[in-house]
Amino acid sequence: MEREGILVVISGFAGVGKGTIVKGLIAGYDNYALSVSMTTRQPREGEVEGQSYFFVTKEEFEKKIEENGLIEHACYVGNYYGTPRAYVEDMLAKGKDVILEIEIQGARNIKKQYPDAVLIFVCPPSATELKNRLVGRGTETPDVVEKRMRRAVEESEGIFEYDYIVVNDEVDKAIAVTHNIIETMHSAPKRNRAFVTSIQNELEDIAKGE
Ligand code: 5GP
């Protein structure tokens, strides 16, 4: 039985560990493909062009929008972020579950265009824990930490727009829960139309022959 690829949106507050969950999914299972976003933000230490992001100028980003080369884009804390179209469409056609690690405006946009997409929001066990993780990460200035915490307040208002929440308390558990959600989605009849139709046709043939 061939599987249809599912578009999986994973969002969550900065510092919640969604990147670690996504890495765990990619490393642990072979059904996933990770979309690499385009951004105008400066690379952080250790980030690799083409793996972490495609780092581009504002002009290059705007050109990509004009060419309809992004399936969604958003502005987050002063920078543009967007999902390149070609890779997503290609991987879905190959039956892969394509992961987009994007923020809430992008998630809303995706749900409008792809109503069958699954939207997952990763939550910290508590807000205090989130602040501690963000400060402990040490990659952001206090000013950016503050901006990201303020942004988290806004984002928390959108959680009910998501299909599922995953609490990242223990990372291995969070990875397993996320994977189970996606596996369960694959069992929906609407995602297995060809299989269901073939069973129905076969049943009719057998019934007629009796
Ligand atoms: P960061 O700068 O920490 O890498 O990412 C900031 C936020 O932008 C995160 O919430 C991240 O998930 C989101 N993001 C990354 N890529 C995209 C994208 O292509 N589109 C949208 N809408 N958000 C993105």
Image (spheres, helix red, strand yellow):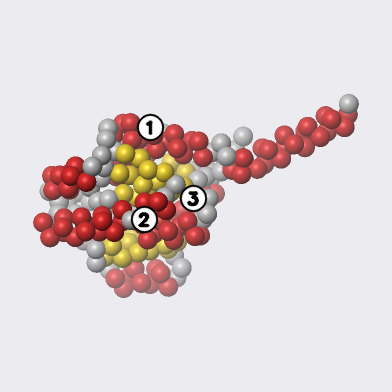
Q: Secondary structure at mark 3?
A: loop
Please report contact status of discs 1 and 2: CB closer than 8 Å, yes or no: no
Q: Position of residue 119 (x, y in %)?
A: 43, 49
Residue holding disc 2: 158
Q: Which residue is mark 1?
A: 176
Q: Which mark is residue 117?
A: 3
Q: Which quarter of the image is occupied by the C terminus?
A: top right
In terms of sequence position, does the residue under pointer 1 or pointer 2 come before the other? Answer: 2
Q: Amino acid at mark 2?
A: Gly
Q: Confirm or reject: label 2 Cβ below 8 Å from ligand 1.
A: no
Q: CA distance from mark 2 to mark 3?
A: 17 Å
Quadrant the N terminus occupies: top right
Instruction: Specify whether 59 is left or right of 210.
Output: left
Mark in the foreground, 2 or 3: 2
Q: Amino acid at mark 3?
A: Ala
| Mark 1 to mark 2 CA distance (whole Å) | 24 Å
Q: Position of residue 204 (x, y in %)?
A: 81, 34
Q: Are marks 2 and 3 in contact (CB under 8 Å)?
A: no
| SS state under label 2 | loop
Q: Relative to residue 194, is residue 88 drawn left or right?
A: left
Three-letter amino acid code at disc 1? Ala
The numbered mark, 3 or 1, whose residue comes first in the sequence reads: 3
